[in-house]
């Protein structure tokens, strides 16, 4: 079994980000501004071992690879941003390609959505559009050939593995794939192993002419058909107005473990935790109890399914993600859990994990790392929602305070 972690190359300043969000903006800008929204809410996520790193530094990439390999991560899947010939967030990937000292298997996921401000919790203003020009099919696949030819690139039966984030956005996907196959064959490959990310609600990868699908939780947690994840908003008291959704880790993991698909070649994906309020603010999605213990249980069960279902040459299990810090979704060490998620990963990889249940469920209590922001203590700004259970809890809290 090979664990592949999705990798975000957003952690360095580049021209477009400075133009759209302000000079010097990186993903760390969002991460550092996050604040807890309710008692027990773990925000902000502060990096530990690697610090607030800069991906322009080769040492950073060396440290990431060393850490990942030490704890059983087989490879990285880099998000690839290509817009009709214009690329963004390309420097870390290009420098990786030319530096053999970054000794880590890798593959690519084409993030083929348009780039807009909604990604950062703002209005849906388009920043980079996918124009889908007549020559895009050829130009796109030709931009990938140098990566495919690299000996570190992950392949299945000698065919390079490529994930497409939203294949349904490509107008004539079958024509596009035919062109891609022709171009890779010209460059010495017998095929291209295409996987559809299950992100847009469409799970029938065969209609796109692809070999398989990749789960991408939390995408699919609220599907219109099949099991859905229960919301916990009514069980919490917020410091201020909140319009997002709260779900529980165990319920989410079980939902994805039990999902059934019409096609069989589906690759499982797990996440260590999820909380994108650093980006989306009061419209974010939060998973409660995203801890190393719960993550280990999900990873172990998904690993067992992977080994049972997939042939040896393609026993891939994906992790979302290595470093999605603004989505509260990272294997990289933080100040709260240290290397806990990495240690859990290694136990599962080595087959020595005893995590057979999800030990943490329900509403977490407050901790030192989740003190409310200053404005939350102002009665004029405090916004509280009360359901029957909340009223009981609030009364009990007041009585307990009077008693003490």
Image: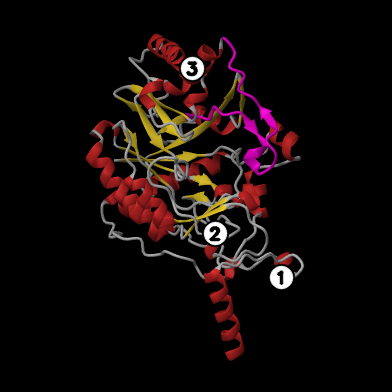
Is 1 on the left or on the right of 239, as rendered? left
Q: Which residue is mark 1?
A: 377
Residue placed at 58% from the left, 71% from the top?
A: 368
Helix, strand or loop under label 3: helix
Cβ atoms at labels 2 and 3 below 8 Å apart? no
Crowd band around label 3 with a 10 angstrom C-alpha radius: few (<14), some (14–19), many (20+): some
| Chain-order first, disc 1 or disc 2 | 2
Q: Which residue is mark 2?
A: 233
Crowd band around label 2 with a 10 angstrom C-alpha radius: few (<14), some (14–19), many (20+): some
Give the foreground label among 2 and 3.
2
Helix, strand or loop under label 2: helix
| Chain-order first, disc 1 or disc 3 | 3
Give the foreground label among 1 and 2.
2
Picture quarter containing residue 32?
A: bottom right
Q: Which residues are magenta?
A: 109-134
Say which quadrant the N terminus sits in. top left
Q: Which residue is mark 3?
A: 141
Residue 239 on image: x %, y %: 65, 65
């Amino acid at each position: 079994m090979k664990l592949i972690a999705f990798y975000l190359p957003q952690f360095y300043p580049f021209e477009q980000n400075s133009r759209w969000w302000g000079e010097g903006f990186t993903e760390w800008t969002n991460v550092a501004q996050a604040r807890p929204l309710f008692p027990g809410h773990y925000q902000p996520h502060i990096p530990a071992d690697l610090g607030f790193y800069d991906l322009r530094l080769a040492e950073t990439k060396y440290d990431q690879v060393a850490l990942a390999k030490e704890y059983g991560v087989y490879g990285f899947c880099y998000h690839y941003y290509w817009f009709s010939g214009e690329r963004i967030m390309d420097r870390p990937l290009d420098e990786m390609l030319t530096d053999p000292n970054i000794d880590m298997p890798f593959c690519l996921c084409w993030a083929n959505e348009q780039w807009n401000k909604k990604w950062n919790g703002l209005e849906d203003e388009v920043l980079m559009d996918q124009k889908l020009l007549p020559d895009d099919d050829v130009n796109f696949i030709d931009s990938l050939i140098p990566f495919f030819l690299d000996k570190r690139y992950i392949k299945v039966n000698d065919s390079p593995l490529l994930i497409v984030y939203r294949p349904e956005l490509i107008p004539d996907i079958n024509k596009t794939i035919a062109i891609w196959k022709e171009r890779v064959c010209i460059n010495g490959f017998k095929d291209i192993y295409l996987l559809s990310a299950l992100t847009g609600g469409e799970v029938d990868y065969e209609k796109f002419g692809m070999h398989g699908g990749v789960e991408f939780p939390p995408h699919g947690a609220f599907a219109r058909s099949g099991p859905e994840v229960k919301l916990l908003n009514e069980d919490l008291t917020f410091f201020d107005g909140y319009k997002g959704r709260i779900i529980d880790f165990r319920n989410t993991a079980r939902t994805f473990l039990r999902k059934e698909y019409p096609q069989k070649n589906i690759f499982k994906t797990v996440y260590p935790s999820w909380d994108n309020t650093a980006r989306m603010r009061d419209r974010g999605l939060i998973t409660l109890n995203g801890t190393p213990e719960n993550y280990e249980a999900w990873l172990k069960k998904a690993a067992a399914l992977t080994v049972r279902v997939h042939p040896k040459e393609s026993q891939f299990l994906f992790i979302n993600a290595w470093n999605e810090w603004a989505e509260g979704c990272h294997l990289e060490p933080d100040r709260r859990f240290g290397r806990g998620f990495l240690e859990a990963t290694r136990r599962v990889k080595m087959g020595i994990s005893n995590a057979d249940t999800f030990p943490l469920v329900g509403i977490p209590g407050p901790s030192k790392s989740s003190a409310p922001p200053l404005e939350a203590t102002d009665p004029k700004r405090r916004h509280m929602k009360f359901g029957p259970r909340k009223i009981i809890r609030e009364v009990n809290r007041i009585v307990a305070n009077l008693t003490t």
